[in-house]
Image (cartoon, rainbow, N blue to C red):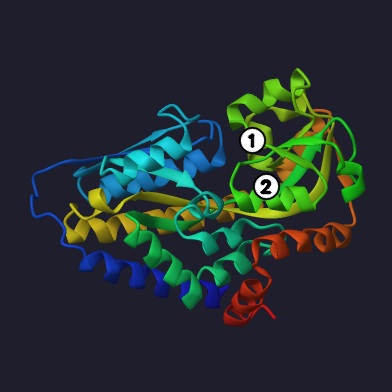
Amino acid sequence: MKRILALALAIIMMLSMTACGSKGGNDTDKVYELKVSTTQTDKSMIYAGLQAAADSVAEKTNGKVKITIYPSSQLGAEEDMIDQALQGMGIAVLTDAGRLSSYVNDIGILNMAYIVENYDQGLKLMETETFKGWDKGLIEKGIRTLTYNYYDGARSFMGNAKFETPESLKGVVCRTPGAAPYVESITALGATPYNIAWSEVYNGIQTKAIDACEVQYTSAVSSAMYEVCDYVSKTEHINLFNMVICGEKWFSKLPAEYQTILLEEFFNAGYNNAQEIIAAQDTMEATLIEKGMEIVEVDKAIFMKAAEAAYEKLGWTELRTQLYAEAGLN
């Protein structure tokens, strides 16, 4: 853990140096407003983690950077919010590497099935020189990563049938995000991917418009998926890391001091929030059981073998090997 924290500190310093390289504004009396959009509900743990960052930034800047969190996609669809951020509006988005692969393709590997087994392994991948190159590529495309270390736990299949093997998922229409890493991973694992907004999933399963979803415990609990799903098939196929991004145009207008504060406080809040979510996994699973869901243990090795087809399809088998070597995960 000490090594992880030391590496994390090095990343913050690197990002801060990059930030100081931006021109930055000089108007110390101006109040800079940033609206953070998330699909998460205001009852989710991630929402609390984002609010913690907002509060810390306000305190450290004496209220000169005002951040407001908008849950449940209140501001609009995630892709639309990213577009607005690119245009220079004061918009930030809680998103993931899968969606950002539209801008820097290879970064999407971070949302592939079984790329890592836990949070610490994920951090190691995101501390590699390869990841730093992707981050610079995003900046060149107009996207500033405020932090990459918010974590929502591992995703598993939930529905009204047990999914114990890839074969049992054949013909199952499963909601998943529309980015290629998700689509190809879920296809390789046996299901038929279908992209609808998370806010529509509860009703979709209830009305049988879809058969299942793949989701982490935090969202399953906060969105009451136990009311429409009987089973959690515990594949834990994707460890979901989230990034908070904003537009480089907006970020570059901040005074250099505020840029550094934004990066440091979002990183710290993300890390602390991740530890809370990791610690709460057993409690959330117990809540799902208490509410009537059955936890189905599966042979993950079978699913891991099936997932290889997704890496081959996207041409990322060698890239994964390279990342593991850089991160010391061989």
Q: Nearer the viewer, residue 275 or 207?
A: 207
Counting the numbered discs, the total is 2
Tell me if residue 119 comes above or below residue 247 in the rendering: below
Residue highlighted by disc 2: 183
Name the secondary structure under disc 1: loop
Q: Nearer the viewer, residue 84 or 10?
A: 84
Left or right: 249, with 234 as reference point: left
Are dots 1 and 2 in contact, CB under 8 Å?
yes
For residue 117, say whether it is visible.
no
Tell me if residue 210 comes above or below residue 96 in the rendering: above
- Which mark is drawn over residue 195? 1
What residue appears at the point 33 percent right and 62 percent down from the top-left corner?
Answer: 140
Quote the CA–CA distance across marks 1 and 2: 9 Å
- Measured from the top left, where is residue 164 in percent x and y? 91, 47
- Which mark is drawn over residue 179? none
Q: Type of residue at label 2? A: Val
Q: Type of residue at label 1? A: Asn
